[in-house]
Image (tube, helix red, strand yellow):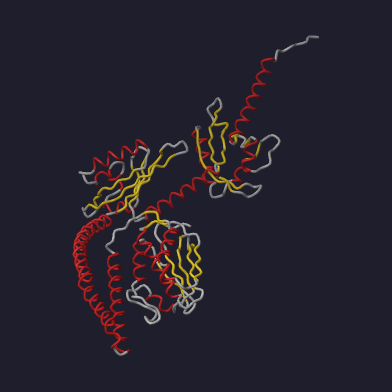
Amino acid sequence: MAILFNDITERKQAELQLRASEMLMRLATEATAVGIWEWNVISNKIRWDAQMFRIYGIAPTDDGFIQYRTWTDCVVPEDLPEQEAALQQTVQRRGRGSREFRIRRPDNGEGRHIQAVETVRTNALGQAEWVVGTNLDITERRKAEAALQESEERFRTMANSMSQLAWIAKADGYIFWYNQRWYEYTGTKPAQMEGWGWQSVHDPKVLPKVIEKWQAATGSGEPFAMEFPLRGADGKFRTFLTRGQPLKDGDGKVVQWFGTNTDVEALKEAEEQVRQLNTVLEQRVVERTAELEAANKELEAFSYSVSHDLRAPLRAVNGFAGIVLEDYGAQLPEDGRRQLDRICKGAQRMGALIDDLLAFSRLSRQSMNWQTVNTQQLVQEALADLSAQREGRRFDLRVTALPSCEGDPALLKQVWLNLLSNAIKYTGGRDPAIVEIGCTGENGARVYFVRDNGAGFDMQYAKKLFGVFQRLHRTEEFEGTGVGLAIIQRIIHRHGGRVWAEAAEGRGATFFFTLAGTQHL
């Protein structure tokens, strides 16, 4: 009996290498989501790997083989004739082919897009025997491409509807797209403008500077902005503001430029008109200033005349009337003495009125001595100056904390003197007279106030309060010239503030004022 031994080591090693190679191939295809298939042209059987079954949504077979019809039943009917024809052409050429088609998965009815690549293998006689290929599900890529295309269409629609001229350039500044408005304005065609054709519509005198700045922007990746003229289809130049914005990738590298040209010719014309208007206004200001200076000189002359020429006769009237009363008063009847007394008081009132008018007229010419003012001290000084007016009367003076302010101390003291003097005067019939001085807030601003329990007034006449010679009470009731509140308002306005009052007839009044530079409590 003879025993034969065959050394099959090499065959076993080859089988192991083949299985290892198949294992690596399967892992590679699964990692890349690529399905591999083999079609025996002679038997018409198709062998799929596991990835192919997953792509098509079909349960795997034990041996991996499927019928040709199994594949064709999955292909969308509209795509099948073209795909079969393309596959047959590849077999006839015994070469390589690629195609895309749609399938409908039988497991869930979902439609997918497939990219197929195949190569024909021939036998020893050169006949097509096997077709080996791959399938890749490109559904998501096709969706992304469709979304990108839709986005680009939306962008182009938006860009073409803009009133501005728009363009897109490559990273190096090569312009490859313009919106419709560009061609309408320049009267050019796309073939004329591609690349560096835009230079043909520029003013030759300005073009070198434009090129210099554009090259600097593309070199640095910084935004581009410049004004320059562009020639229109009518051959006329108009000024445009051009801006180029770099579009960068995740690494900060410029991939494209998007730019716009905005017609600013009308704006430039308007700026020129404004400039000319400002020149005219400046000339008018000079002229009006000269007129105002002349008027001020006339006013100063008038004030001098009032101060000297009117005061002398008034002093004479008052002096002679007083002499008559003093020397001959006993010989005059009572009515005569009363009339002379009225003459004296009238002359005195006229003198006070002249003094107030002169003070009022000087306010607009008086220079401002700006400094930080201790309001609390200023009010105490004003009250001390008015102490004589309070003699013989009961007063309840309530002075709360008064924050400092910025202004002219002499003018602000006049404000407090006038307000406090009025409060003392109009509380003449009250016992005790109550005068409250304080500071509150309104919309974040400091508001100083003087409140009294005096005669008050009807608010329907409040607008008349600060006018010259405007009085809400008869002279017989309360003395005054009707200029004090007008002086207050002018001083407050010169300090950038405002003044107002609130009152009720017979129930007192409150005067408020604000000043610039005292906006926060």
Does 437 appear above or below 374?
below
- Residue that sits furthest to the top in the current view: 2
Q: Quadrant of residue 44?
A: top right
Image quadrant for the N terminus? Answer: top right
Does 12 appear above or below 462?
above
Q: Nearer the viewer, residue 333 or 515?
A: 333
Locate residue 260 relative to residue 93 in the image: left or right: left
Q: Give the percent coordinates (x, y) of residue 313.
A: 21, 76
Q: Nearer the viewer, residue 335 or 180?
A: 335
Q: Give the percent coordinates (x, y) of residue 285.
A: 22, 61
Q: How many marks?
A: 0
Does 322 appear above or below 58?
below
Q: Give the percent coordinates (x, y) of residue 335.
A: 31, 89
Q: Give the percent coordinates (x, y) of residue 454.
A: 47, 75
Locate residue 296 relative to residue 390 in the image: left or right: left
Locate residue 141 relative to residue 43 in the image: left or right: left
